[in-house]
Amino acid sequence: MALTGRSALVAALGAAVVWVVGSGAAVLGVEALLVCGVLLDLLGAARPRDLRLERDGPTAVRLGESAALTLRVTNTGSRRLRGRLRDAWVPSAGADLTRHQLDVPPGEGRLLTTTLRPTRRGDRHPDRVTVRAVGPLGLAARQRAHRVPWTVRVLPEFGSRRHLPARLDRLRVLDGRNAARVRGAGTEFDSLRSWVDGDDVRSIDWRATARRTEVAVRTWRPERDRRVLVVLDSGRTAAGRVGDAPRLDAAMDAALLLAALASAAGDRVDLLVYDRRVRAAVIGARPGRLLPDLVSALAGVEADLVETDMRGLAAEVLRRAGRDALVVLISTLDAAPVTDGLLPVLPLLLARHRLVLAAVEDTRVTELAAGRGDAEAVYAAAAAERTRSERAATGALLTRRGVRVVAAGPDELPPALADTYLALKASGR
């Protein structure tokens, strides 16, 4: 049961009457009148339990986009239901227009629309649907909460897909579809052509030249059907926020762009998310299903506030990647996790695979390093410079060990990692 504002108004008017009359009988009369009115209203109100509620709409939406869900309300009772309905969702679902006026005659239905604009990845569920059926006098209402389950999976935004067309054009150049060829050890032989100034002498085919009247050089195209394993570190360093989002979200954006590009290049792409256990894995997906499978697997992954077990991560990589794969680890360049965790297992990884380490840099550190306004800004700049120098030293150490290092801000990392992949593809590595 719920009292309405009209009952409060009636009670206030009754109090004014009692104040004017000033007798105990007036108090009892006003109270009895109000109680009788509330009881009659409750008896005359429709029963919320007679409503049948059904949801319909999308079950997936990309972060930053909106989804309109419909709630069908059918009155299976014998009385006309007038009142209000509240369709409650968790705050991160970004629900709009959750309160609706209801006027449903017996045997009829109404469609109510709630628009979601989620602010976080993952599965979003509704809370209760609360229906308040007001009586004919408008003094009181019957109220009931219904459970109407639904799940909307919020997928990663994949904002870096705007960089994909330009990288695909460069890939076509490497692949020979734009009348260009590359040369390098480990690539597949494509054809012969005449020598032009600037060609590498190592590309000359001497046997073909002996049969011709001009110097012939070999052209190559990148190898296809190679193995690319993208590994996301979901440990505590991935939980740190850069701008308005965790580092893990920027890592996912870079992973999706790289996966789309490598799949278009004809390579086999797998994904692994790991901290102390496997959080998500996409292994052996068909090219046409790769991106849908990736975004679905990544949607519900959140960073865990634990130190990543690099030995366990290396064991998973070695178990799943076979040999001679390109392993792209999106992690951190912080000194402690690298020196204590990654460096001891590097020989195991580099003995069988080529390793690229990608790290999301905090652009705020660069801004603080430029501050010179007052003493506080100078101290902040000194701390920022120390952080930058430590990460640069860590990157240089990994480079000397044979690791390709890519470090950039959240917006710059996806295209930088894609360019690194194209450079390795062009050089046949």
Image (spheres, helix red, strand yellow):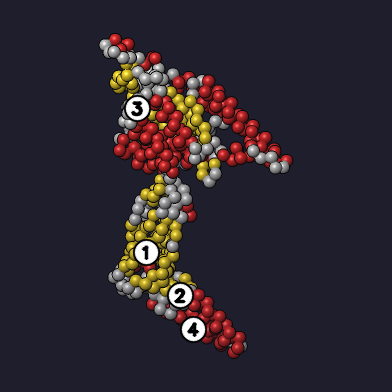
Give the residue at mark 2.
140
Quadrant of residue 318 in the image?
top left
The residue lying at 37 percent from left, 57 percent from top is 69
Q: Amino acid at mark 2?
A: Ala
Which amino acid type is shown beneath numbered disc 4?
A: Leu
Secondary structure at numbered mark 4: helix
Residue that label 3 marks: 180
Indicate which disc, 1 or 4, sits on the residue closer to the N terminus.
4
Extreme residue in the bottom direction = 21
Mark closer to the chain start, 3 or 4: 4
Q: Secondary structure at mark 2?
A: strand
Whether residue 64 can be seen here: yes
Callout in the foreground (4, 2)? 2
Amino acid type of disc 1? Leu
Locate residue 177, reporting x and y percent: 31, 30
199 w.r.t. 60: above or below:
above
Question: Which amino acid does the dot numbered 3 rest on?
Answer: Ala
Give the CA distance from mark 2 to mark 1: 24 Å
Cα distance between the residues tagged 3 and 4? 92 Å
**Residue that label 4 marks:** 33
The tally of labels here is 4
**Disc 2, disc 3: CB below 8 Å?**
no
Q: CA distance from mark 1 to mark 4?
A: 37 Å
The residue positioned 31% from the left and 35% from the top of the image is 287
Mark 2 or 3: in front is: 3
Q: Position of residue 242 (x, y in %)?
A: 54, 41
**Which residue position holds label 1?**
112
Q: Which quadrant of the rendered structure holds the C terminus?
A: top left
**Quadrant assignment for the N terminus:** bottom left
Q: Nearer the viewer, residue 8 or 216?
A: 216
